[in-house]
Image: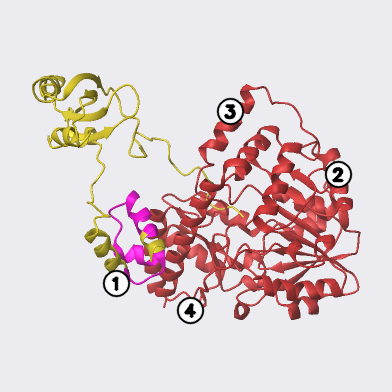
Chain colours: A red, B yellow
Amino acid sequence: MKKTSFLSKQADSLQPSGIRRFFDLAAQMEDVISLGVGEPDFVTPWSFIEHSFHALEQGYTSYTENAGMLDLREEISNYLLGSFGVNYDAEKEIIVTVGASQAIDLALRATVNPGEEVLVVEPGFVAYVPTVSLAGGTPVTIQTRPEDDFKLTPELLEAAITPRTKAIILCNPNNPTGAALTGNELVKVAEVVEKHDLLVLSDEIYAELTYEDVHTSFPAIKNMKERTVLISGFSKAFAMTGWRLGYATGPEEIIQTMVKIHQFTMMCAPTIAQHAALEAMKNGKSSVDYMIKSYEQRRNFIVSSLNEMGLSCPNPGGAFYAFPSIRETGLSSADFAEELLQEEQVAVVPGNVFGESGEGFVRCSYATSLKQLDEAMRRIKRFVDRRI
Amino acid sequence: MQEQEVELLQLIEKNANLEPSKIAKLMAVSEEEVRELLRSLEEKKAILGYSTLIDWAKVVQKEEVTAMVDVKVQPARGSGFDKVAERIYRFPEVKAVYLMSGAYDLSVSVEGKTMMEIGRFISEKLSALDSVLSTTTHFVLKRYKHDGIILDDEDDNDKRMVVTP
Protein backbone atom coordinates (compact mmCIF):
# COMPACT_ATOMS: atom_id res chain seq x y z
CA MET A 1 0.00 0.00 0.00
CA LYS A 2 1.58 3.26 -1.08
CA LYS A 3 1.58 6.04 1.47
CA THR A 4 2.45 9.13 -0.50
CA SER A 5 1.61 10.69 -3.84
CA PHE A 6 4.15 9.94 -6.53
CA LEU A 7 3.44 13.23 -8.29
CA SER A 8 5.94 16.05 -8.28
CA LYS A 9 4.75 19.05 -6.33
CA GLN A 10 5.27 21.25 -9.33
CA ALA A 11 3.27 19.13 -11.75
CA ASP A 12 0.57 18.56 -9.18
CA SER A 13 0.18 22.28 -8.59
CA LEU A 14 -0.42 23.08 -12.29
CA GLN A 15 -3.97 24.25 -12.89
CA PRO A 16 -5.78 22.30 -15.59
CA SER A 17 -6.60 24.50 -18.57
CA GLY A 18 -10.07 26.05 -18.40
CA ILE A 19 -10.43 25.12 -22.05
CA ARG A 20 -10.17 21.47 -21.15
CA ARG A 21 -13.17 21.62 -18.84
CA PHE A 22 -15.21 23.40 -21.44
CA PHE A 23 -14.17 20.90 -24.08
CA ASP A 24 -15.51 18.04 -21.99
CA LEU A 25 -18.82 19.82 -21.70
CA ALA A 26 -19.08 20.58 -25.43
CA ALA A 27 -17.97 17.11 -26.48
CA GLN A 28 -21.06 15.57 -24.89
CA MET A 29 -23.51 17.68 -26.89
CA GLU A 30 -24.88 16.94 -30.32
CA ASP A 31 -25.29 19.22 -33.34
CA VAL A 32 -22.76 21.63 -31.90
CA ILE A 33 -21.40 24.36 -34.11
CA SER A 34 -17.99 25.03 -32.72
CA LEU A 35 -16.37 28.42 -32.77
CA GLY A 36 -14.12 27.07 -30.05
CA VAL A 37 -11.43 25.64 -32.23
CA GLY A 38 -7.98 27.17 -32.35
CA GLU A 39 -7.03 25.67 -35.68
CA PRO A 40 -7.89 26.10 -39.37
CA ASP A 41 -10.96 24.40 -40.81
CA PHE A 42 -9.00 23.85 -44.00
CA VAL A 43 -7.42 20.47 -44.47
CA THR A 44 -3.66 20.67 -45.21
CA PRO A 45 -3.22 21.63 -48.89
CA TRP A 46 -3.05 18.51 -51.03
CA SER A 47 0.39 19.16 -52.48
CA PHE A 48 1.93 19.09 -48.97
CA ILE A 49 0.19 15.81 -48.19
CA GLU A 50 1.14 14.33 -51.55
CA HIS A 51 4.75 15.34 -51.04
CA SER A 52 4.83 13.50 -47.73
CA PHE A 53 3.53 10.34 -49.50
CA HIS A 54 6.39 10.70 -51.93
CA ALA A 55 8.92 11.07 -49.11
CA LEU A 56 7.57 7.93 -47.44
CA GLU A 57 7.78 5.99 -50.71
CA GLN A 58 11.38 7.10 -51.04
CA GLY A 59 12.08 5.67 -47.61
CA TYR A 60 12.52 8.84 -45.58
CA THR A 61 11.52 7.18 -42.34
CA SER A 62 14.58 7.69 -40.17
CA TYR A 63 15.64 10.45 -37.76
CA THR A 64 16.80 13.79 -39.12
CA GLU A 65 19.49 16.10 -37.71
CA ASN A 66 18.54 17.22 -34.21
CA ALA A 67 17.91 20.76 -35.37
CA GLY A 68 15.81 19.52 -38.31
CA MET A 69 16.71 18.82 -41.95
CA LEU A 70 19.14 21.43 -43.22
CA ASP A 71 17.09 21.74 -46.46
CA LEU A 72 14.10 22.74 -44.40
CA ARG A 73 16.05 25.16 -42.23
CA GLU A 74 17.39 26.78 -45.38
CA GLU A 75 13.87 27.14 -46.75
CA ILE A 76 12.70 28.62 -43.44
CA SER A 77 15.61 31.04 -43.54
CA ASN A 78 14.68 32.16 -47.08
CA TYR A 79 11.04 32.37 -46.16
CA LEU A 80 11.63 34.57 -43.10
CA LEU A 81 13.90 36.85 -45.08
CA GLY A 82 11.42 37.12 -47.96
CA SER A 83 8.29 37.51 -45.86
CA PHE A 84 9.46 39.51 -42.86
CA GLY A 85 12.93 40.78 -43.67
CA VAL A 86 14.69 38.90 -40.87
CA ASN A 87 17.87 37.05 -41.66
CA TYR A 88 18.89 33.85 -39.81
CA ASP A 89 21.72 31.44 -40.49
CA ALA A 90 20.14 28.08 -41.33
CA GLU A 91 23.01 26.13 -39.78
CA LYS A 92 23.30 27.88 -36.45
CA GLU A 93 20.29 30.03 -35.74
CA ILE A 94 17.28 27.86 -36.59
CA ILE A 95 15.77 24.84 -34.88
CA VAL A 96 12.81 22.82 -36.15
CA THR A 97 10.53 21.75 -33.32
CA VAL A 98 7.44 19.72 -32.55
CA GLY A 99 5.03 22.58 -32.99
CA ALA A 100 5.59 26.12 -31.83
CA SER A 101 4.53 24.81 -28.40
CA GLN A 102 7.75 22.85 -28.03
CA ALA A 103 9.73 25.84 -29.26
CA ILE A 104 8.28 27.92 -26.42
CA ASP A 105 9.12 25.21 -23.90
CA LEU A 106 12.70 24.86 -25.19
CA ALA A 107 13.27 28.59 -25.29
CA LEU A 108 12.15 28.95 -21.68
CA ARG A 109 14.15 25.98 -20.45
CA ALA A 110 17.21 27.27 -22.26
CA THR A 111 17.06 30.72 -20.69
CA VAL A 112 15.18 30.89 -17.39
CA ASN A 113 16.74 30.39 -13.95
CA PRO A 114 14.76 29.62 -10.80
CA GLY A 115 13.30 32.79 -9.33
CA GLU A 116 13.51 34.78 -12.55
CA GLU A 117 10.31 36.36 -13.71
CA VAL A 118 8.83 35.94 -17.16
CA LEU A 119 6.15 38.36 -18.27
CA VAL A 120 3.09 36.87 -19.94
CA VAL A 121 0.62 39.12 -21.72
CA GLU A 122 -2.99 38.29 -21.00
CA PRO A 123 -5.51 37.50 -22.34
CA GLY A 124 -3.08 35.05 -23.86
CA PHE A 125 -2.46 31.51 -25.01
CA VAL A 126 -3.17 29.13 -22.13
CA ALA A 127 0.18 27.34 -22.24
CA TYR A 128 2.51 30.24 -21.42
CA VAL A 129 2.01 30.44 -17.65
CA PRO A 130 2.37 26.69 -16.99
CA THR A 131 5.36 26.41 -19.34
CA VAL A 132 7.15 29.20 -17.50
CA SER A 133 6.48 27.42 -14.19
CA LEU A 134 7.71 24.09 -15.53
CA ALA A 135 10.92 25.79 -16.65
CA GLY A 136 11.43 26.95 -13.07
CA GLY A 137 10.59 30.58 -13.73
CA THR A 138 7.98 32.76 -12.10
CA PRO A 139 5.20 33.80 -14.44
CA VAL A 140 4.04 37.40 -14.02
CA THR A 141 1.00 38.36 -16.02
CA ILE A 142 0.29 41.68 -17.66
CA GLN A 143 -3.41 42.33 -18.06
CA THR A 144 -4.06 44.27 -21.27
CA ARG A 145 -7.21 46.35 -21.43
CA PRO A 146 -10.21 46.42 -23.76
CA GLU A 147 -9.85 50.21 -24.08
CA ASP A 148 -6.44 49.60 -25.68
CA ASP A 149 -7.96 46.89 -27.90
CA PHE A 150 -6.02 44.44 -25.71
CA LYS A 151 -2.72 45.69 -27.05
CA LEU A 152 0.37 45.70 -24.87
CA THR A 153 1.40 49.29 -24.17
CA PRO A 154 4.87 50.46 -23.05
CA GLU A 155 3.29 51.74 -19.82
CA LEU A 156 1.76 48.38 -18.94
CA LEU A 157 5.06 46.69 -19.70
CA GLU A 158 7.08 49.16 -17.68
CA ALA A 159 4.79 48.73 -14.67
CA ALA A 160 5.27 44.96 -14.61
CA ILE A 161 9.06 44.97 -14.67
CA THR A 162 11.01 44.20 -11.49
CA PRO A 163 14.73 43.58 -10.94
CA ARG A 164 13.96 39.87 -11.34
CA THR A 165 12.34 40.19 -14.77
CA LYS A 166 14.21 38.13 -17.33
CA ALA A 167 11.97 37.85 -20.34
CA ILE A 168 8.63 38.59 -21.90
CA ILE A 169 6.51 36.29 -24.04
CA LEU A 170 4.82 38.35 -26.71
CA CYS A 171 2.23 36.77 -28.98
CA ASN A 172 1.60 38.93 -32.02
CA PRO A 173 -0.99 38.71 -33.52
CA ASN A 174 -2.59 37.54 -30.32
CA ASN A 175 -4.61 34.47 -29.45
CA PRO A 176 -7.37 34.94 -28.21
CA THR A 177 -7.99 38.63 -28.89
CA GLY A 178 -6.73 38.94 -32.48
CA ALA A 179 -4.91 42.10 -31.43
CA ALA A 180 -2.03 42.85 -33.78
CA LEU A 181 0.55 45.43 -32.77
CA THR A 182 1.72 47.66 -35.60
CA GLY A 183 5.37 48.34 -36.35
CA ASN A 184 5.24 51.65 -34.49
CA GLU A 185 3.60 50.13 -31.45
CA LEU A 186 6.23 47.39 -31.37
CA VAL A 187 9.04 49.93 -31.57
CA LYS A 188 7.70 51.57 -28.38
CA VAL A 189 7.58 48.19 -26.64
CA ALA A 190 11.11 47.50 -27.89
CA GLU A 191 12.41 50.67 -26.23
CA VAL A 192 11.26 49.43 -22.83
CA VAL A 193 12.63 45.96 -23.57
CA GLU A 194 16.05 47.39 -24.37
CA LYS A 195 16.06 49.76 -21.41
CA HIS A 196 15.57 46.83 -19.02
CA ASP A 197 17.72 44.41 -20.98
CA LEU A 198 14.95 41.83 -21.42
CA LEU A 199 14.84 38.72 -23.55
CA VAL A 200 11.80 38.49 -25.85
CA LEU A 201 10.11 35.26 -26.84
CA SER A 202 8.16 36.49 -29.82
CA ASP A 203 5.42 34.01 -30.69
CA GLU A 204 4.47 34.92 -34.25
CA ILE A 205 2.59 31.78 -35.18
CA TYR A 206 -0.22 33.96 -36.62
CA ALA A 207 2.12 36.34 -38.47
CA GLU A 208 0.83 35.48 -41.94
CA LEU A 209 -2.75 36.04 -40.81
CA THR A 210 -2.73 39.81 -40.54
CA TYR A 211 -5.34 41.80 -42.38
CA GLU A 212 -4.84 45.50 -41.76
CA ASP A 213 -1.14 46.26 -41.62
CA VAL A 214 1.83 44.30 -42.89
CA HIS A 215 3.13 42.17 -40.03
CA THR A 216 6.27 43.47 -38.34
CA SER A 217 8.44 40.68 -37.00
CA PHE A 218 9.90 41.63 -33.62
CA PRO A 219 13.54 40.78 -34.46
CA ALA A 220 13.25 43.09 -37.50
CA ILE A 221 13.16 46.04 -35.10
CA LYS A 222 16.49 47.77 -34.50
CA ASN A 223 18.65 46.12 -31.79
CA MET A 224 16.02 43.47 -31.09
CA LYS A 225 17.42 40.52 -33.03
CA GLU A 226 20.18 39.87 -30.48
CA ARG A 227 17.61 39.60 -27.67
CA THR A 228 14.74 37.84 -29.41
CA VAL A 229 13.79 34.22 -29.95
CA LEU A 230 11.31 34.20 -32.83
CA ILE A 231 8.83 31.36 -32.56
CA SER A 232 6.56 30.24 -35.35
CA GLY A 233 5.46 27.17 -37.23
CA PHE A 234 3.29 25.57 -39.82
CA SER A 235 0.11 24.96 -37.86
CA LYS A 236 -1.95 28.05 -38.53
CA ALA A 237 -1.17 29.71 -41.87
CA PHE A 238 -0.26 26.41 -43.52
CA ALA A 239 -3.15 24.46 -41.97
CA MET A 240 -0.85 21.78 -40.54
CA THR A 241 -1.77 21.59 -36.84
CA GLY A 242 -1.77 17.81 -36.64
CA TRP A 243 1.65 17.49 -38.24
CA ARG A 244 3.12 19.16 -35.14
CA LEU A 245 5.80 21.23 -36.75
CA GLY A 246 7.19 24.56 -35.62
CA TYR A 247 10.49 26.34 -35.43
CA ALA A 248 12.46 28.88 -33.47
CA THR A 249 15.15 31.26 -34.64
CA GLY A 250 17.41 33.45 -32.58
CA PRO A 251 20.94 34.13 -31.34
CA GLU A 252 23.21 31.13 -31.93
CA GLU A 253 23.94 30.69 -28.22
CA ILE A 254 20.27 30.30 -27.34
CA ILE A 255 19.29 28.22 -30.35
CA GLN A 256 22.19 25.81 -29.85
CA THR A 257 21.24 25.40 -26.19
CA MET A 258 17.69 24.67 -27.29
CA VAL A 259 19.07 22.09 -29.73
CA LYS A 260 20.94 20.48 -26.84
CA ILE A 261 17.77 20.10 -24.77
CA HIS A 262 15.83 19.00 -27.84
CA GLN A 263 18.47 16.37 -28.60
CA PHE A 264 18.07 14.79 -25.18
CA THR A 265 14.30 15.09 -24.87
CA MET A 266 12.91 14.80 -28.41
CA MET A 267 15.72 13.75 -30.80
CA CYS A 268 14.14 15.55 -33.72
CA ALA A 269 10.81 16.72 -35.10
CA PRO A 270 8.86 14.09 -37.09
CA THR A 271 10.65 13.40 -40.36
CA ILE A 272 7.52 13.00 -42.43
CA ALA A 273 6.15 16.33 -41.23
CA GLN A 274 9.44 18.00 -42.11
CA HIS A 275 9.08 16.77 -45.67
CA ALA A 276 5.54 18.10 -45.92
CA ALA A 277 6.80 21.42 -44.55
CA LEU A 278 9.51 21.53 -47.18
CA GLU A 279 6.85 21.48 -49.87
CA ALA A 280 4.84 24.08 -47.92
CA MET A 281 7.84 26.42 -47.88
CA LYS A 282 8.68 25.88 -51.55
CA ASN A 283 5.28 25.84 -53.20
CA GLY A 284 2.72 26.74 -50.57
CA LYS A 285 2.19 30.40 -51.26
CA SER A 286 -0.94 30.25 -53.42
CA SER A 287 -2.71 27.84 -51.04
CA VAL A 288 -1.79 29.97 -48.06
CA ASP A 289 -2.87 33.19 -49.79
CA TYR A 290 -6.24 31.66 -50.59
CA MET A 291 -6.80 30.67 -46.96
CA ILE A 292 -5.74 34.09 -45.67
CA LYS A 293 -8.23 35.81 -48.00
CA SER A 294 -10.99 33.49 -46.78
CA TYR A 295 -10.18 34.25 -43.14
CA GLU A 296 -10.26 37.96 -43.85
CA GLN A 297 -13.71 37.70 -45.44
CA ARG A 298 -15.03 35.63 -42.57
CA ARG A 299 -13.54 38.09 -40.09
CA ASN A 300 -15.45 40.91 -41.80
CA PHE A 301 -18.59 38.78 -41.67
CA ILE A 302 -18.37 37.72 -38.03
CA VAL A 303 -17.34 41.15 -36.71
CA SER A 304 -20.20 42.96 -38.42
CA SER A 305 -22.67 40.23 -37.39
CA LEU A 306 -21.59 40.39 -33.73
CA ASN A 307 -21.75 44.18 -33.61
CA GLU A 308 -25.18 44.15 -35.29
CA MET A 309 -26.58 41.90 -32.60
CA GLY A 310 -25.22 44.15 -29.85
CA LEU A 311 -22.03 42.33 -28.86
CA SER A 312 -19.38 44.99 -29.21
CA CYS A 313 -16.43 43.60 -31.11
CA PRO A 314 -13.45 45.58 -32.39
CA ASN A 315 -11.97 44.54 -35.72
CA PRO A 316 -9.15 42.12 -34.90
CA GLY A 317 -6.02 42.88 -36.89
CA GLY A 318 -4.84 39.30 -37.09
CA ALA A 319 -5.15 35.58 -36.23
CA PHE A 320 -8.58 33.99 -36.70
CA TYR A 321 -10.36 35.00 -33.52
CA ALA A 322 -13.01 37.57 -32.74
CA PHE A 323 -13.14 38.58 -29.09
CA PRO A 324 -16.50 40.28 -28.51
CA SER A 325 -17.61 41.79 -25.22
CA ILE A 326 -20.60 39.99 -23.75
CA ARG A 327 -21.06 42.45 -20.85
CA GLU A 328 -24.32 43.76 -22.34
CA THR A 329 -25.91 40.41 -21.57
CA GLY A 330 -25.13 40.74 -17.86
CA LEU A 331 -23.57 37.27 -17.89
CA SER A 332 -20.10 36.19 -16.90
CA SER A 333 -17.95 34.72 -19.66
CA ALA A 334 -18.33 31.23 -18.28
CA ASP A 335 -22.11 31.51 -17.91
CA PHE A 336 -22.47 33.01 -21.37
CA ALA A 337 -20.49 30.18 -22.95
CA GLU A 338 -22.23 27.49 -20.95
CA GLU A 339 -25.77 28.79 -21.48
CA LEU A 340 -25.10 29.43 -25.17
CA LEU A 341 -23.91 25.86 -25.51
CA GLN A 342 -26.91 24.44 -23.66
CA GLU A 343 -29.55 26.58 -25.36
CA GLU A 344 -28.24 27.01 -28.89
CA GLN A 345 -25.48 24.40 -29.24
CA VAL A 346 -22.82 26.90 -30.20
CA ALA A 347 -19.41 26.50 -28.57
CA VAL A 348 -17.35 29.60 -27.86
CA VAL A 349 -14.53 29.81 -25.33
CA PRO A 350 -15.01 31.94 -22.17
CA GLY A 351 -12.49 34.78 -22.24
CA ASN A 352 -11.43 34.32 -18.62
CA VAL A 353 -9.63 31.05 -19.40
CA PHE A 354 -7.06 33.23 -21.20
CA GLY A 355 -6.47 35.43 -18.14
CA GLU A 356 -8.51 37.56 -15.77
CA SER A 357 -8.71 40.50 -18.18
CA GLY A 358 -10.56 38.22 -20.58
CA GLU A 359 -13.57 38.18 -18.24
CA GLY A 360 -16.57 39.74 -19.96
CA PHE A 361 -15.44 38.47 -23.35
CA VAL A 362 -15.63 35.25 -25.33
CA ARG A 363 -13.37 33.92 -28.05
CA CYS A 364 -15.05 33.03 -31.34
CA SER A 365 -12.85 31.35 -33.90
CA TYR A 366 -13.81 32.19 -37.47
CA ALA A 367 -11.74 29.36 -38.87
CA THR A 368 -15.07 27.78 -39.73
CA SER A 369 -16.94 27.43 -43.02
CA LEU A 370 -19.11 30.37 -43.96
CA LYS A 371 -22.18 28.15 -43.82
CA GLN A 372 -21.44 27.15 -40.22
CA LEU A 373 -20.49 30.68 -39.30
CA ASP A 374 -23.75 32.01 -40.71
CA GLU A 375 -25.80 29.50 -38.73
CA ALA A 376 -23.75 30.18 -35.58
CA MET A 377 -24.46 33.92 -35.89
CA ARG A 378 -28.17 33.20 -36.26
CA ARG A 379 -28.13 31.10 -33.10
CA ILE A 380 -26.05 33.56 -31.07
CA LYS A 381 -28.36 36.39 -32.11
CA ARG A 382 -31.36 34.39 -30.91
CA PHE A 383 -29.58 33.79 -27.60
CA VAL A 384 -28.53 37.42 -27.20
CA ASP A 385 -32.01 38.73 -28.12
CA ARG A 386 -33.39 36.86 -25.13
CA ARG A 387 -30.85 38.57 -22.85
CA ILE A 388 -30.53 42.17 -24.01
CA MET B 1 -12.45 48.77 -58.08
CA GLN B 2 -10.99 45.93 -60.08
CA GLU B 3 -9.82 44.30 -56.88
CA GLN B 4 -13.37 44.38 -55.56
CA GLU B 5 -14.71 42.93 -58.81
CA VAL B 6 -12.27 40.05 -58.57
CA GLU B 7 -13.10 39.40 -54.91
CA LEU B 8 -16.84 39.42 -55.65
CA LEU B 9 -16.47 37.10 -58.63
CA GLN B 10 -14.31 34.68 -56.66
CA LEU B 11 -16.99 34.54 -53.97
CA ILE B 12 -19.90 33.84 -56.31
CA GLU B 13 -17.88 31.61 -58.59
CA LYS B 14 -18.07 28.95 -55.89
CA ASN B 15 -21.55 29.82 -54.67
CA ALA B 16 -23.87 31.71 -57.00
CA ASN B 17 -26.48 31.48 -54.29
CA LEU B 18 -24.66 33.82 -51.90
CA GLU B 19 -26.99 36.70 -51.00
CA PRO B 20 -25.79 40.26 -51.62
CA SER B 21 -26.27 41.08 -47.93
CA LYS B 22 -23.81 38.34 -47.00
CA ILE B 23 -21.37 39.30 -49.73
CA ALA B 24 -21.48 42.84 -48.39
CA LYS B 25 -20.47 41.66 -44.93
CA LEU B 26 -17.70 39.42 -46.25
CA MET B 27 -16.21 42.20 -48.33
CA ALA B 28 -16.87 44.90 -45.73
CA VAL B 29 -18.80 47.09 -48.19
CA SER B 30 -22.46 48.15 -48.36
CA GLU B 31 -25.15 45.95 -49.85
CA GLU B 32 -25.91 48.67 -52.38
CA GLU B 33 -22.30 48.62 -53.54
CA VAL B 34 -22.54 44.86 -54.04
CA ARG B 35 -25.70 45.19 -56.12
CA GLU B 36 -24.07 47.92 -58.18
CA LEU B 37 -20.98 45.75 -58.77
CA LEU B 38 -23.15 42.81 -59.79
CA ARG B 39 -25.14 45.00 -62.18
CA SER B 40 -22.05 46.34 -63.88
CA LEU B 41 -20.45 42.88 -64.12
CA GLU B 42 -23.62 41.54 -65.71
CA GLU B 43 -23.70 44.47 -68.10
CA LYS B 44 -20.21 43.92 -69.34
CA LYS B 45 -20.91 40.20 -69.52
CA ALA B 46 -18.25 39.26 -67.02
CA ILE B 47 -21.09 37.41 -65.32
CA LEU B 48 -22.76 35.35 -68.04
CA GLY B 49 -25.28 33.50 -65.89
CA TYR B 50 -25.91 31.85 -62.54
CA SER B 51 -26.06 28.10 -62.98
CA THR B 52 -26.42 25.33 -60.43
CA LEU B 53 -24.25 22.26 -60.32
CA ILE B 54 -26.60 19.33 -59.84
CA ASP B 55 -26.00 15.69 -59.16
CA TRP B 56 -29.20 14.50 -60.85
CA ALA B 57 -28.62 10.93 -59.83
CA LYS B 58 -29.41 11.88 -56.21
CA VAL B 59 -32.96 12.88 -57.17
CA VAL B 60 -34.20 11.04 -60.23
CA GLN B 61 -33.13 8.05 -62.25
CA LYS B 62 -32.04 10.30 -65.06
CA GLU B 63 -29.53 8.60 -67.30
CA GLU B 64 -27.29 11.22 -68.76
CA VAL B 65 -24.59 10.24 -71.18
CA THR B 66 -21.65 12.47 -71.96
CA ALA B 67 -19.19 11.95 -74.77
CA MET B 68 -15.96 13.77 -75.48
CA VAL B 69 -15.50 13.85 -79.25
CA ASP B 70 -12.13 14.56 -80.85
CA VAL B 71 -12.87 16.24 -84.17
CA LYS B 72 -10.48 16.83 -87.05
CA VAL B 73 -11.67 19.58 -89.33
CA GLN B 74 -10.68 21.40 -92.46
CA PRO B 75 -10.08 25.05 -91.48
CA ALA B 76 -11.66 27.63 -93.79
CA ARG B 77 -9.77 30.30 -95.66
CA GLY B 78 -10.04 33.60 -93.82
CA SER B 79 -11.84 32.36 -90.73
CA GLY B 80 -9.67 29.42 -89.68
CA PHE B 81 -11.47 27.18 -87.22
CA ASP B 82 -13.96 29.78 -85.98
CA LYS B 83 -16.72 29.23 -88.55
CA VAL B 84 -16.71 25.48 -88.26
CA ALA B 85 -16.56 25.72 -84.47
CA GLU B 86 -19.62 27.93 -84.56
CA ARG B 87 -21.46 25.45 -86.80
CA ILE B 88 -20.81 22.89 -84.10
CA TYR B 89 -21.40 24.87 -80.89
CA ARG B 90 -24.80 26.10 -82.06
CA PHE B 91 -26.22 22.58 -81.61
CA PRO B 92 -27.95 22.38 -78.22
CA GLU B 93 -26.59 18.84 -77.74
CA VAL B 94 -23.10 20.33 -77.63
CA LYS B 95 -22.12 21.49 -74.13
CA ALA B 96 -18.57 22.61 -74.76
CA VAL B 97 -16.20 23.17 -77.66
CA TYR B 98 -12.47 23.84 -77.41
CA LEU B 99 -9.83 24.35 -80.08
CA MET B 100 -6.95 22.06 -79.15
CA SER B 101 -3.28 21.74 -79.89
CA GLY B 102 -2.08 18.22 -80.73
CA ALA B 103 -3.50 15.30 -82.62
CA TYR B 104 -6.91 16.75 -83.43
CA ASP B 105 -8.49 20.19 -83.73
CA LEU B 106 -11.73 20.54 -81.79
CA SER B 107 -12.69 18.88 -78.54
CA VAL B 108 -16.49 18.68 -78.42
CA SER B 109 -18.45 17.64 -75.37
CA VAL B 110 -21.86 16.20 -76.23
CA GLU B 111 -24.67 15.27 -73.86
CA GLY B 112 -27.61 13.00 -74.57
CA LYS B 113 -30.03 10.63 -72.91
CA THR B 114 -28.53 7.47 -74.38
CA MET B 115 -25.45 6.34 -76.25
CA MET B 116 -27.71 5.73 -79.23
CA GLU B 117 -28.89 9.31 -79.19
CA ILE B 118 -25.32 10.63 -79.07
CA GLY B 119 -24.26 8.20 -81.78
CA ARG B 120 -27.06 9.46 -83.98
CA PHE B 121 -26.07 13.07 -83.40
CA ILE B 122 -22.45 12.40 -84.28
CA SER B 123 -23.12 10.41 -87.41
CA GLU B 124 -26.02 12.45 -88.72
CA LYS B 125 -25.08 15.98 -87.68
CA LEU B 126 -21.46 16.35 -86.64
CA SER B 127 -19.69 14.01 -89.08
CA ALA B 128 -22.01 15.11 -91.83
CA LEU B 129 -20.58 18.64 -91.80
CA ASP B 130 -18.48 19.22 -94.92
CA SER B 131 -15.47 20.56 -93.01
CA VAL B 132 -15.38 17.69 -90.51
CA LEU B 133 -12.75 15.19 -91.61
CA SER B 134 -13.02 12.64 -88.81
CA THR B 135 -14.33 12.06 -85.28
CA THR B 136 -13.23 9.88 -82.37
CA THR B 137 -15.80 9.46 -79.62
CA HIS B 138 -15.02 8.74 -75.95
CA PHE B 139 -17.94 8.10 -73.61
CA VAL B 140 -17.64 9.28 -70.02
CA LEU B 141 -18.04 6.35 -67.62
CA LYS B 142 -17.85 8.13 -64.28
CA ARG B 143 -17.50 11.69 -63.07
CA TYR B 144 -15.13 12.13 -60.15
CA LYS B 145 -14.64 15.87 -60.23
CA HIS B 146 -16.49 18.44 -62.27
CA ASP B 147 -15.81 22.17 -62.51
CA GLY B 148 -13.53 22.01 -59.51
CA ILE B 149 -16.06 20.20 -57.36
CA ILE B 150 -15.45 16.66 -56.14
CA LEU B 151 -18.60 14.58 -56.56
CA ASP B 152 -19.45 11.99 -53.95
CA ASP B 153 -17.06 13.57 -51.47
CA GLU B 154 -18.47 11.55 -48.60
CA ASP B 155 -15.73 12.17 -46.13
CA ASP B 156 -15.62 15.94 -45.86
CA ASN B 157 -16.73 16.13 -42.22
CA ASP B 158 -14.92 18.38 -39.81
CA LYS B 159 -12.41 16.18 -38.05
CA ARG B 160 -11.35 18.73 -35.46
CA MET B 161 -12.16 18.46 -31.78
CA VAL B 162 -14.86 20.80 -30.51
CA VAL B 163 -12.69 23.07 -28.39
CA THR B 164 -8.93 23.51 -28.65
CA PRO B 165 -6.55 26.23 -27.40
Circles 3 and 1 on the same subunit: no
- Identify the residue at the far left of this view: B124
What is the span of residues highlighted in magenta in the rendered image? B6-33
Q: Which mark is residue A261?
A: 2
Q: What separation in Å lies between label 3 and label 4 (alpha carbons)? A: 51 Å
Circles 2 and 4 on the same subunit: yes
Q: Secondary structure at mark 4?
A: helix
Q: What separation in Å lies between label 3 and label 1 (alpha carbons)? A: 48 Å
Q: What separation in Å lies between label 2 and label 1 (alpha carbons)? A: 59 Å
Q: Percent x, y for residue A225?
A: 80, 61
Mark 3 is on which residue type? Phe
Q: Percent x, y for residue A219?
A: 76, 61
Q: Please give the chain letter of the residue carrying mark 2.
A: A
Q: What separation in Å lies between label 2 and label 3 (alpha carbons)? A: 30 Å
Q: Please give the chain letter of the residue carrying mark 1.
A: B
Residue occupying image coordinates x 28% and y 53%: B16
Q: Percent x, y for residue A131?
A: 77, 55
Q: Nearer the viewer, residue A196 or A348?
A: A196
Q: Which of the two discs, 3 and 4, labels the residue nearer the N terminus?
A: 3
- Residue B113 lies left or right of residue A247; in this view the side is left
Counting the numbered discs, the total is 4
Q: Please give the chain letter of the residue carrying mark 3.
A: A
Give the labeled residue for mark 1.
B32
- Of the two numbered discs 2 and 1 in the rendering, the one whose residue sits closer to the viewer: 1
Q: Looking at the rendering, in which quadrant would you find the C terminus of chain A?
A: bottom left
Q: Secondary structure at mark 1?
A: helix
Q: What separation in Å lies between label 1 and label 4 (alpha carbons)? A: 30 Å
Give the labeled residue for mark 4.
A328
- Of the two numbered discs 3 and 4 in the rendering, the one whose residue sits closer to the viewer: 3
Assess whether residue A355 is covered by the magenta stretch.
Answer: no
Q: Which of the two discs, 2 and 4, labels the residue nearer the N terminus?
A: 2
Give the labeled residue for mark 3.
A53
